[in-house]
Image (cartoon, coloured by chain):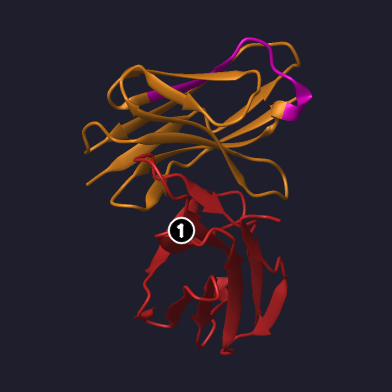
Amino acid sequence: RKEVEQDPGPFNVPEGATVAFNCTYSNSASQSFFWYRQDCRKEPKLLMSVYSSGNEDGRFTAQLNRASQYISLLIRDSKLSDSATYLCVVTHPGGATNKLIFGTGTLLAVQP
Amino acid sequence: SQTIHQWPATLVQPVGSPLSLECTVEGTSNPNLYWYRQAAGRGLQLLFYSVGIGQISSEVPQNLSASRPQDRQFILSSKKLLLSDSGFYLCAWKGTNEQYFGPGTRLTVT
């Protein structure tokens, strides 16, 4: 079983739609959680951290359910510029090296 | 502010040739540094990490090696490239818990 699992998509949505991505992780000791965005042939960029209480940044809302080991990202009012691959990331517990475990990503294509 | 540089941006090398990729970080001291590889259509795989000068930990057995000769410099090398070494190589530094990536080097081994 992969440590971080995501639906690979693609998710094809019209502009203005609301889209939700889900992610599950296998190690219950993971402590930090993130969503990264990766544009085609570019490096991943941090989109937002995910906190237990849930957090929002503009049109983006992230949720964490530790009991279910489940992370979500909601994008409201989708823009063409939101088209990218969204990576779910968790820290590998233990040690001071802060290893990140990446999901393989969910591809979002926002259509005009 | 912190910035991270990688070069070259793209590289085409024949099988059996050597490799040297460089990563430098500005605006921070003694950062934890990481090398990742992303093969076509696949997720990021951690190759090496370093918590300081001369300190390298390897995550997966392979024909690659890493070195950290200076605080803000991290180098990925190979003596003889394999076809399977093709991919997108990314260097990253650690913030609080998150990591920030350089622009990457796209390597094609022919």
Residue B79 counted in the magenta span: yes
Does residue B110 show up? no
Residue at 71% from the left image edge and 78% from the top image edge = A12
The x and y percentages for residue A89 are 51, 58
Chain letter behind tag 1: A
Query: On screen, B86 above or below A55?
Result: above
Q: Which chain is orange?
A: B
The x and y percentages for residue B13 are 69, 19
Q: Quadrant of residue B101?
A: top left
Of A62 and B22, the residue lying toward us: A62
Q: Report which colour depicts chain A.
A: red
Of B102 and A20, the residue lying toward us: A20
Magenta part of the chain: B74-84
The x and y percentages for residue A51 are 36, 72
Residue at 59% from the left image edge and 69% from the top image edge = A23
- Horizontal relation, residue A54 to residue A9: left or right: left
Does residue B24 show up? yes
Residue at 39% from the left image edge and 29% from the top image edge = B50
Residue at 22% from the left image edge and 37% from the top image edge = B28
The x and y percentages for residue B11 are 62, 26
Name the residue carrying label 1: A29
Residue B89 counted in the magenta span: no
Q: Which part of the image, by quadrant, shows the N terminus of chain A?
A: bottom right
Q: Quadrant of residue A58?
A: bottom left
Looking at the picture, which amino acid does disc 1 mark? Answer: Ala
